Image (spheres, rainbow, N blue to C red):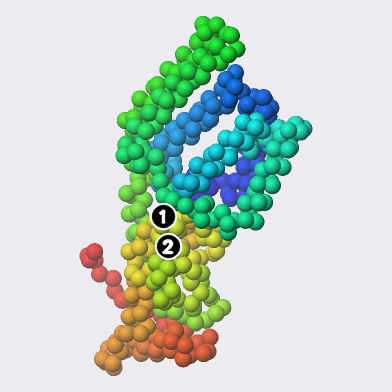
Amino acid sequence: MGPLVPYGIISGEFNFIIAIILGVAFGFILEQAGFGSSRKLAGVFYGYDFVVLRVFFTAAITAMTGLIFGNYFGIIDINMVYINPTFVWSIIIGGVIMGVGFVVGGFCPGTSLAGAATGKIDAMFFIGGILIGVLIFGEMFPVFEPLYKANALGPIKIYNTLGISQGLFAFLLIIIAVVAFYVTRRIENKINKIPAAESTHSYAFATAVLAIIAAIILFIPAERKNKGSISYAQEVDAILKDNSRFIHTDELAFNLMHHDFNPVLVDIRTPEEYENFSLPGAINIRLKDVIAPQWRDFFRDNEEVIIYSNSSVYTEDAYILLHQAGIENIRILQGGLNEFFYLIFEENHEALNPKDPVYKHKMDMHRFRARAAKYFQGTETDSKPSLSVPSAPKVIPVEGGC
C-alpha cells in the first residue's frame, strides 16, 4: 500500500487485508472486462482486439505518473522504491517464453486465474502448465542458474541507461502510448470493418488529457519537493539532533556480556570487514541493502536494533534511510567500532589522579572496561559480570560548541 504503512496511516496487518480485497477486486474487474477469455487476449496477435495492449500501456502510464507526482510532492520517496535487478538473458528468454505462452494459451498468469475462477477449462490447463514450469525450474535451478544470472546489470532505470531525464522519458512514453492507441484502433477498424468516424470521438478527450499530463511531467524536477508537511532538510536535521539514537560503548558492552539483555546487532560494513571482526551475534547487512524488502520485516519484528560500522558516518546514513522507511526502533553505536576498540582495549588508564573529583567513577569504569576487554578477547568466561555499568558523572552543561 505504498507509503501508508511506513507513515503509520495503516498497520502492517491491515495492509494484508487491503491487499486481499484489492486482489479480489482486480480479478473481478479483469473478468468483467473480458480478460478471463482466451479469445480476448489472443485478439492482440490476430489484430481484431487490442484492448490488452491499451490496458497495459494505461497501467504503465498511471503508475509512472503517480510515482513522479508522489515523489515530487513528498508522498513517496522514489529512491526507496524497490527495483528488480536486470538480468539481460533472463529477460530475453523469459519474454520469449511468455510471448509464446500468451499466443498459444491466450492467457497471462493473472488473467488465467481470473478465467479459472469462472470455470474456464483452458485457463485451468494454463495454470497447470505454469505450475509444471515452476516445478521444473525450481528442481533444475543449479543447471539454469548460470544462464539465469548472466549479464547482470543491477537495478537500472531506463532513462539513466538512455542518458535522458526522468521527465523526458515519461513524456516520450506517453507520446508512444498515444500513437500506439491511434494505430491499433485503425488496425481494429480495418479488421472488424468499422468506419473510422465511429471510433475517433471517444479517443479525442483521452488524447488531450494525456498530452496535458505529458507536458506537465516534462518540466517536473526529479528532486522531491518535500516529505509530507515537513521539508526533507528539516526532517533530517531533526533526526540528527536527537541524541537518543545513540548507545554508548559501555552500555552495549554490558548488554553483550550479560546474556539476559542481548541486543540485536546489525553490522553494515563490507562482508570482508565483517568476516575479519564483528561483535558477538551481529549479522551483516550492507548499507545499500538496509532498506531492501527482504530485510524490512527483520527490522520491524525486533523491539530494538543496534547498527554499527567503523565510525558513525555510514550508520547515520543507514539510520536516516530506515527512519524514512518508517522503521524507528533503531539505535546507533556511538563512535562505531573505532570508539569501541579505543575505550575497551586501548584507552590508557595509568595516569588517573586520586585527587580528581571523579576519580572513583573513572576507576569503576576502568575496572569494567578491563573486564570487558577480557570478555571480548575470550579470557573471561563468566557471562554475567557482577559489575554494573558505572553511571556517568554529573557535569554542568556549557553553551556553545558544535
Asked whether residue 332 appears in the rendered view, the answer is no
Asked if residue 275 lies left or right of residue 302, the reply is: left
- CA–CA distance in space, label 2 to label 1: 13 Å
- Relative to 205, residue 90 above or below: below
Q: Earlier in the sequence, mark 2 or mark 1?
A: 2
Secondary structure at numbered mark 2: loop
Residue 138 coordinates in the image, percent (x, y):
63, 54
Q: Position of residue 224 (x, y in %)?
A: 36, 41
Query: Against 93, is 387 above or below?
Result: below
The image shows residue 292, relative to residue 344, as above or below, that is above
What residue type is disc 2 on?
Arg
Q: Quadrant of residue 101?
A: top right
The residue at the point 36 percent across, 51 percent down is 235
* Label 1 Cα neighbours within 10 Å, binned few <14 / some 14-19 / many ≥20: some
- Quickly name the residue at label 2: 286
What is the number of the mark on residue 387?
none
Task: Please give the name of the residue rendered at 51% of the width and 65% of the height, measured from the top-left corner.
Answer: 304
Q: Position of residue 112 (x, y in %)?
A: 67, 35
